Amino acid sequence: MESYARKAGALTGVDPRFGVPALVTITEPESTFNNQRWRADTVDANARGRIVADGHPQNCSRGATLCIPTTFAAFHQEETATTPYAVVATRCATINDVRDRYRVDRAGSNFASCVQQANPKRSARGY
């Protein structure tokens, strides 16, 4: 899992000292490192809307960091896959989202302090 986090960090300019632990911490409770869980979360609060081509509700969270489609589209990183099911692509979108929403700095040095879900010393909660 760290290799995906390193690649996403490299593409977005996040220092691996901060980005790798933050992304691994986010991914663990979201997916429990289970590839099947990375497909879609069809029981979360976002799991609504018509069933779309991938067989899941339109708005349900998808991918390793469970991005909703609108967030993935808004924060998609150039040079990555256009599907949230691609681990690097969804992690890049998550980095770009938290930079915007929580003011995580370019290097990611405040990633864990700004995003509770990225801090292994704090209990997980939505972001």
Image (cartoon, grey):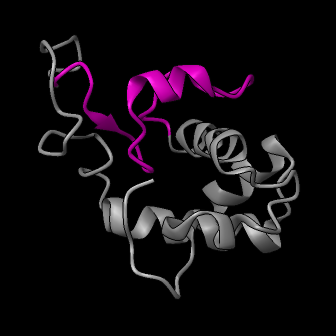
Task: Please state the horizontal and vertical placement of residue 78, each as a whole percent of the image.
Answer: 74, 22
Q: Position of residue 101 (x, y in %)?
A: 63, 42
| Left or right: 70 in relation to 50 | right
Residue extending farthest to the bottom is 121
Residue 24 in the image, given as x and y percentages of width and height: 55, 68
Is 17 drawn above or below residue 38 in the view shown?
A: below
Q: Quadrant of the N terminus?
A: bottom right
- Residue at the (48%, 66%) spot, across then down: 117
**Residue 33 visible in this rendered orientation of the protein:** no
Q: Is residue 68 magenta?
A: yes
Please give the count of numbered marks on the rendered protein: 0
Classify 23 as above or below 82: below
Q: Residue at x 45, y 21 (%)?
A: 70
Residue ID at (37%, 66%): 125
Residue 16 visible in the shown view: yes
Question: In the rendered structure, which segment of residues is drawn in magenta?
Answer: 57-86
Query: Does residue 36 lie above or below 63 as drawn?
Result: below
Q: Nearer the viewer, residue 8 or 98?
A: 98
Q: Residue at x 51, y 72 (%)?
A: 25
